[in-house]
Image (spheres, rainbow, N blue to C red):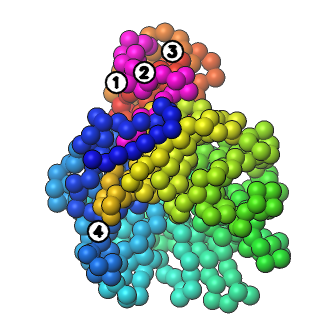
Amino acid sequence: MLATSASSQSFSLDNTFGNQGVITSVDASDVYFIDFDDNGNIIAIASKIGSQPSDYHYLSIIKTDANGVVMETFGNEGVMILTDYANARIYSSQITNENKILVFGYFSETYFGDSQAMFMQFAENGNLDESFGNNGKIIINTALNDDVYANCASFGSSDFLLVGKRNHLDFSEVKCYISKYNYDGNLDESFGQEGNAYLTDNATYRIVPLSIYVLDDQSVLVAEFNEFKGDGNYELALCKLDQNGNLVTDFANNGVWLMDIVQDFNLDYEYFNKIIENNGDIIVSGKGKEGKLFLSKFSTTGVIDTNFGENGFYYSEIQGYTEFNPVLINWESYIIGNHDRIISVNENGISDNNLFTFEDIIYHDMKMQGKNKIIVGGFYNDNFVITRLNANSKSGEDPASLEKNQLNTLSIYPNPAKDNLYFNEETQAEIIDIQGRVLYKTTEAVKSVNISNLKSGIYFIKTDNKIQKFVKE
């Protein structure tokens, strides 16, 4: 039996999920990314590795319902394995506005062959979506020495592809930039300079675009580090672009925020690797010495919140080597982790000393499933694993009892709803998506909220620390 341990009661294994809290009986080897479709089903982007590492490293996608039951109508009995490419290395994924599965990575037909940077899109049944790009694929043209990072995003109802590139053929000519592609794979030449937004002033900064995030106001945040500092060291870097690829000059210092924290926190190196937005704040995670984590908090205008943690930073002694370190929001707390541990940080940037340690799981991604539930994906004894944790609310209530209490609270109608959601009494409310992100918050007590701009799918309405589920048609 898979065993876990915790130093407190803040996190616990949810035995109602899968088989006693875990899914392991799937023909896959590892989970890279976790996401949810509009119906609340779990999509796991994974790999299938041969008995010898160089045999093959296939892309695999698994689909389960919200409670971890494998959906056998997807792919081959719940699993899609793409055998066209012997070596597939996946770096990002997203569920699109049309509920399709988009992945980005490097693919090569033979294990040691030349690889291509490529987007692939799959339909809801796991088949390659041949209406996307060229028979389901878009190849990103790259030079031999390009590092490529990518993200799928949307402005309004239009999906598009954002690709970060760092070309280092000659260090004196290194270029860092974001390219925007339309959903048909053509470069959007209205963005930046003929489709490319360059992240340098050629004097004081050149920002490597590891993390790309589209904010609610449709501007684009880019983060990792500034490699143009001038003394051979790097420093943290964050910049903001508008929809046209121009720097937003009222953000930080003419669109760019830079800071060196190596000395402040005794780090060997420093870089940002994950961005989220929460209720008007920007939360960015990063890594330092020996893979240890830190969090920082900014306003949307690029001002660091010096009341958060220590002068704007929370620094953790947890170390590990997960490439991207997820940041989750559960009520007013942040949940972060690395490798085999998860910790909770209060909204003021101070640890609440709640720690959960997996004894056997190494995880790569985690997502909130509504509130108080965390889906975690990774590997266990070299095999695929997804598990679910309970995460207590800020008030300390047990998640199961909290959900039970919700049944007798405020009434919402109609459900499903298309344009407006009504309440049986005036209340302040928050609308939360399936990943726990606050999408809308009332400033006063109301008897209805307009939901016409939401995509179809499952959402939650929060009132007075109680949550109810509703469906947007």
Residue at the location (53% across, 54% down)? 338
Distance from disc 1 to disc 2, alpha carbons, whole Å, reads 21 Å
Q: Residues within 10 Å of mark 1 (few under 14, many from 20)?
A: some
Distance from disc 4 to disc 1, alpha carbons, whole Å, reads 40 Å
Of the image marks 3 and 4, the number of the one nearer the N terminus: 4
Of the image marks 3 and 1, the number of the one nearer the N terminus: 1
Residue 208 coordinates in the image, percent (x, y): 66, 70
Residue 183 coordinates in the image, percent (x, y): 44, 64
Q: Give the residues drawn in magenta, as a range.
A: 388-411
Of the image marks 1 and 2, the number of the one nearer the N terminus: 2
Q: Is residue 230 magenta?
A: no
Residue at the location (38% across, 24% down)? 400
Of the image marks 4 and 1, the number of the one nearer the N terminus: 4
Is residue 406 visible to the viewer in this orientation of the structure?
A: yes
Location of residue 200 with respect to 97 vertically, above or below: below
Location of residue 397 with respect to 187 vertically, above or below: above
Residue 204 coordinates in the image, percent (x, y): 83, 72
Give SS at disc 1.
Answer: loop
Give SS at disc 2.
Answer: helix
Residue annotated with mark 2: 402
Of the image marks 2 and 4, the number of the one nearer the N terminus: 4
Residue annotated with mark 4: 48
Q: Residues within 10 Å of mark 3 (few under 14, many from 20)?
A: some
For the residue marked with disc 2, what is the amino acid? Leu
Residue at the location (73% across, 42% down)? 309
Residue annotated with mark 1: 415
Which label number is shown at residue 444?
A: none
Give SS at disc 4.
Answer: strand
Residue 437 coordinates in the image, percent (x, y): 52, 39
Quadrant of the rendered image containing residue 273: bottom right
> Looking at the image, which residue sits at the far top?
425
